[in-house]
């Protein structure tokens, strides 16, 4: 059975598809940047960045702020602890809950990677007129809010 031409989605003009392509390209570029630093992977970087943003986050909180499932976060946390880049400290109120903190070594590595990731962001935004860049960032926030779980 053939699909009616009017029902066909033109992928090059379809916003969800464009966003997937953009996210994939940004992810690949970010992954390449991160890999240069002691063979980090993107999952480890996302956990490191989430912990740097808010010291003391739990693994469940990292899951909530990153596009990763519990299994990926758990493996990344374990690896980062083994590499002495983060540490888990028991909660004062509930010893079963572990809060994640950067070690000195982790903070140093975070700063190095963040410098290069920010340079990538600057390069991306430089391709746009400043007003368009600002409008794009505001629009992306609105779309993320609209599609929040």
Image: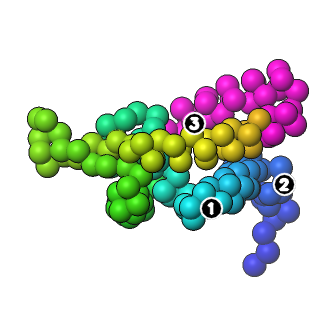
Lateral position of residue 71 relative to residue 17, left or right: left
Lateral position of residue 15 relative to residue 113, left or right: right
Q: How many marks?
A: 3
Circle 3 SS class: helix
Mark 1 neighbour density, 10 Å: few (under 14) some (14–19) many (20 or more):
some
Label 2 or label 1, whichever lies nearer to me, is: 1
Residue 35: numbered disc: 1
Disc 3 target residue: 144
**By what rule are the colours in the image chosen?**
rainbow
**Residue 82 percent location from the top left of the image:** 35, 62
**Residue 77 percent location from the top left of the image:** 37, 57
**Residue 89 percent location from the top left of the image:** 23, 44
Circle 1 SS class: helix
- Magenta part mainly helix, strand or loop? helix
Quadrant of res 112: top right
Q: Earlier in the sequence, mark 1 or mark 3?
A: 1
Label 3 or label 2, whichever lies nearer to me, is: 3
Q: Is residue 43 visible?
A: yes
Give the residues drawn in magenta, as a range: 123-149
**Residue 27 percent location from the top left of the image:** 66, 55
Lateral position of residue 115 relative to residue 146, left or right: right
Q: Earlier in the sequence, mark 2 or mark 1?
A: 2
Q: Is residue 60 visible?
A: no
- Tag 3–tag 2 contact (CB < 8 Å): no
Vertical side of 56 occupied by 29: above or below: below
The Cα atoms of the two marked residues, 1 and 3, are separated by: 28 Å
The Cα atoms of the two marked residues, 2 and 1, are separated by: 30 Å
The residue nearer to you, when weighing 106 against 125, is 106
The Cα atoms of the two marked residues, 3 and 2, are separated by: 21 Å
Disc 2 target residue: 12
Quadrant of res 74: bottom left
């Amino acid at each position: 059975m053939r699909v009616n031409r009017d029902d066909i989605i033109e992928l090059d003009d379809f916003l969800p598809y464009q966003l997937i392509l953009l996210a994939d390209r940004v992810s690949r570029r970010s992954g390449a940047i991160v890999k240069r630093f002691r063979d980090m992977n993107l999952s480890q970087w996302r956990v490191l960045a989430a912990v740097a943003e808010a010291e003391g986050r739990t693994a469940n909180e990292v899951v909530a702020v990153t596009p990763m499932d519990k299994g990926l976060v758990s493996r990344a946390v374990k690896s980062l602890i083994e590499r002495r880049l983060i540490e888990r400290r028991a909660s004062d109120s509930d010893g079963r809950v572990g809060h994640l903190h950067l070690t000195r070594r982790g903070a140093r590595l975070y700063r190095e990677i963040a410098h290069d990731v920010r340079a990538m962001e600057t390069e991306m935004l430089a391709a746009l007129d400043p007003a368009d860049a600002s409008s794009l960032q505001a629009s992306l926030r609105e779309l993320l809010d609209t599609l929040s779980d």
